[in-house]
Image (cartoon, rainbow, N blue to C red):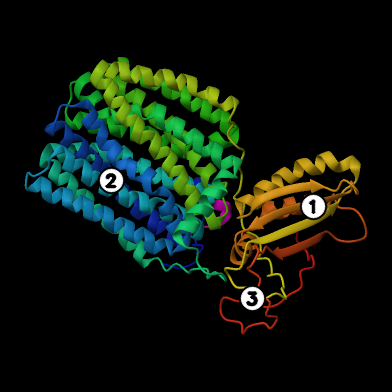
Amino acid sequence: MTDQPKLQTFSVGGVTAPLRYIAFRYIWLASVLSNLGILIRGVGAAWAMTEITSSADKVALVQTATTLPVMLIALPAGAIADMHDRRLVALVALSIAFCGVTALTALQWLHLTTPNLLLVLCFVVGSGAALMYPAWQSSVSEQVPAATLPAAVTLNGISFNIARSFGPAIGGVVVGIGGVVAAFALSAVLYLPLMIALFLWKRVAEPSRLPREQLSRAIISGVRYITNSPSIKIVLTRAVVTGAVGSSISALMPLVARDLLNGGAQTYGIMLGAFGFGAVIGAINIGEVRKRMSGEAAMRACMLSMAGATTAAALSRDPVLTATALILAGAVWTVAFTLLDIGAQLSAPRWVAGRSLAAYQAAYSGGIAFSSWGWGRLTDTAGVETALLCSAGLMLLSPLLGLWLRMPRIIVRDEDVEVLPDPEVRLPLTDRSGPLVVETEYRVTPENARAFHNMMQEVQLSRQRNGAYGWSIARNIADPELWTERYHCPTWLDYLRQRNRWTQSDRALDHQVAAFHIGPDPVRVRRMLERPFGSVRWKEDVPDRGENEVPPFDCKRSETHQ
C-alpha cells in the first residue's frame, strides 16, 4: 500500500469518494471483516452470559464491560495516538483485543468460563478497542484529503453497520450450530485482515520540529483544548446524553429476544441484524440528512424517532413488528452518532485530533456503560417492557437539551496553517525556561472598544486552547485607546508549541483583531521571562547552544500577534 493517498483510475463520487484512495480502501475493507468479528464475539459473549446466569444485570454488564475501558483510558489513548505512529498504536491495540478473544476461545473450549471471568476478558477486549479507536479514526485524515474526510468518517460508520447487519445473524447461526466457542474463534480470526492491512500501510510520519510531549503533558494539553472549545464540549455533552438514554435497546436486546419474543440465539441474532440493517440505511443517507437539515434538527428528529421505535419494541410480541421497529431504531441511532462523530472530528485540528476523538468516545461509551448497567438493574426490578418504556420517555425529553446546547454548525476541519517562525531572543533560553509572559498592545478607538473587547473573549479561548494560562485584557486609564493583552506559557517550549498549533480560524481571528488597531505603529508584542526572587543568573555570557537551546532573535512584532 502507498504511504500517501493515491488517486486510482476509477472515479467515484459522494460518500464512496474516499475509496478512490488505495490505503483507505484496503484498511476499510479489512475493517468490515474486523467489525464483523466484533459483532460475532458480542453475540457469543451475551449469549454465553444468558447460559451461565439468569440475572438481567449480569447480561447488561457484558456491554458495560466492553465499553467501560473506552471511558477509562480514552484520554491517554488519544494522547498516545497524537504522540506516536498511529499505525503502530493501532496494531498494538488490535493485538491486545486479539489476545483477549483468543483467551475467551480457550476458556470456553475448556468449559472454564464463569460470569466474572467472562466480564474480565470482555474488559480486556474493550481495552484494545479503546486504544485502537482514536489512533484508527484520527489516521483517516492521513489516508484521504481533507475534502473527503466527512465521507471517510461516514464510511467508517458504514463499515461497522454493514457488519452489524450481518454479524449478529451470522453470530446467532454460529452459536446455534457450533456453540459460543465457535463464535469466539471466528471473531479472533477476523481480526487478522485488519492487522495485515495496517502492517502493510506505509505511513509517512511528518517529523515535528519540536520534542515530543510527555504523556501527562499531552493529556493536559488535550483536556485544556477541549475545555476551551465550545463546539467540542457541546458534542461531548450530547454524546453522553444520547448514549445514556438510547442504550437500552442494545443492552437489553438478548432479553427482548428471550423474554418478549420467546426466542433463542438465532432470534437474538436476527434482531441485532435488523438493527444493523437499519444502521446501514441511516449511514448511506447521512449525506442527504446533512444537506436537508441542520445538525440540531437532525438530532431532534433522530431522538423522537428512536423513542417511537423503542416503544414499539417494548410493546411488541411479534418478531416481524419488533424487527421493523429495530430497523428504524438502527437507522436513526446511526445518523445521530455519525453527526456527533463528524462534529468531534472536524472541531479539532490535526495536532489534537486523537485526543478529541478519544474524549468523544469516552463520553459516548461512558454514557452507554453506566446506563446499560442501570437499564439492567431496572429490568430486574420492573421487567424488560418497563425499562424500554422509561428509556423511550427520556428520549422524548432529550431534544429539550438543544435549547441550551445547540449542535454546532461544522463544514470542514479547522486545519493547521504554516508553522510560524520562531521569534528571536537575546536572552539565553532552554526548553524549560519559564514561565514566559507575553504582552500585546493594541490601540483601539473608543467607538470600537466594546466590539474589540467582545472579540478578545474569542482570543482568550484561542490562546488557552493552545497552551496559555493567566490570560487577561486591560485598558489604560490614562490612555483609553491603549489595550494590553497578557498571558503566560509554562515554558519556552510550551510557547513554541503554541505557535505551532495555529489554525486557519486562529489566523482569521488574528486578522480580525488586528483590523481594530489604529495609529502609525504596528501592534507591539513583548515576550518576557518571568523571574521569581533569587532565580536570576547574572552571568552575561551566552552558553554554547545545545540541542535544547534556541538561536538569538529580536522580539519585535512580525506578521502575527503570537
Placement of 8 over or under 177, stated as above or below: below
The answer to whether residue 111 is left or right of residue 130 is left
Asked if marks 2 and 3 touch (Cβ < 8 Å), the reply is no
Q: Which residues are magenta?
A: 143-148
Residue visible at 56% across and 69% down?
Answer: 210
> What's the residue type where badge 2 is placed?
Ile
Q: Quadrant of residue 70?
A: top left
Q: Which residue is mark 2?
A: 38
Q: Secondary structure at mark 1?
A: strand
Q: Which residue is mark 1?
A: 484
Residue nearer the viewer, 160 or 498: 498
Could you say where residue 262 lies in the image, as x and y percent from the top left?
18, 21
Could you say where residue 175 lies in the image, as x and y percent from the top left?
15, 39
Q: Quadrant of the N terminus?
A: bottom left
Q: Which residue is mark 3?
A: 550
Placement of 482 over or under 250, stated as above or below: below
